[in-house]
Image (tube, helix red, strand yellow):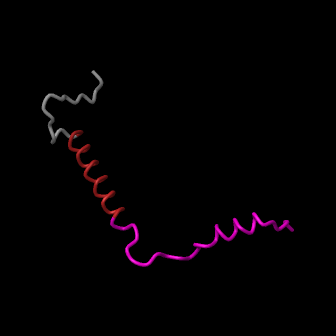
Amino acid sequence: MGQKTALGSLLKAIGNSGQGKVVPGWGAVPVMTVIGLLLLIFLVILLQIYNQSLLLQGFSVNWNGN
């Protein structure tokens, strides 16, 4: 059996204090939605550049490495 110390009791109280608790309301959903939409827009722009459906003036894309 392990030895009980004051530090161990303090750490146990801190570590398990939030277990099973959920913040009421929306929480971080709006923030994660904005981040997800920005990532989606970034990936669509990259895909359009790769497919050459979005052409940038003065910037040529060469995927062959030549």
Is 43 on the left-hand or right-hand side of 54? right
Residue 18 occupies which quadrant of the picture? bottom right
Query: Per the image, is 5 magenta?
Result: yes
Q: Was residue 23 drawn as part of the magenta stretch in this picture?
A: yes
User: Within the image, what quadrant is residue 57 found in?
Assistant: top left
Q: Which sits in the foreground, 10 or 23?
A: 10
Q: In the image, residue 45 lies at what x, y percent?
A: 23, 45
* Along the line of sight, the residue nearer the viewer: 11 or 45: 11
Horizontal and vertical percent position of residue 40: 28, 54
Residue lying farthest to the left in this orientation: 57
Magenta stretch in the rendered image: 1-30
The quarter of the rendered structure image containing the N terminus is bottom right
Image coordinates for residue 32, horizontal then vertical, percent: 36, 62
- Does residue 29 appear left or right of residue 1 in this picture? left
- The residue located at (33%, 58%) in the rendering is 36
Residue 23 in percent (x, y) is at 46, 75
Residue at image position (20%, 44%) is 48
Across the whole image, how many numbered discs are drawn on residues?
A: 0
- Tell me: residue 52, above or below residue 42: above
Q: Give 8 or 50, whichever is nearer the viewer.
A: 8
Compared with 28, 59 (above or below) is above
Considering every residue shown, the one lying at the far top of the view is 66
* Residue found 32% across the figure and 63% down from its top: 33
Q: Of all residues shown, which one is farthest toward the front?
A: 6
Q: Is residue 15 left or right of residue 21?
A: right
Q: Quadrant of residue 51?
A: top left
Between 22 and 54, the one lying in front of the other is 22
**Residue at the spot x=27%, y=21% of the render?**
66
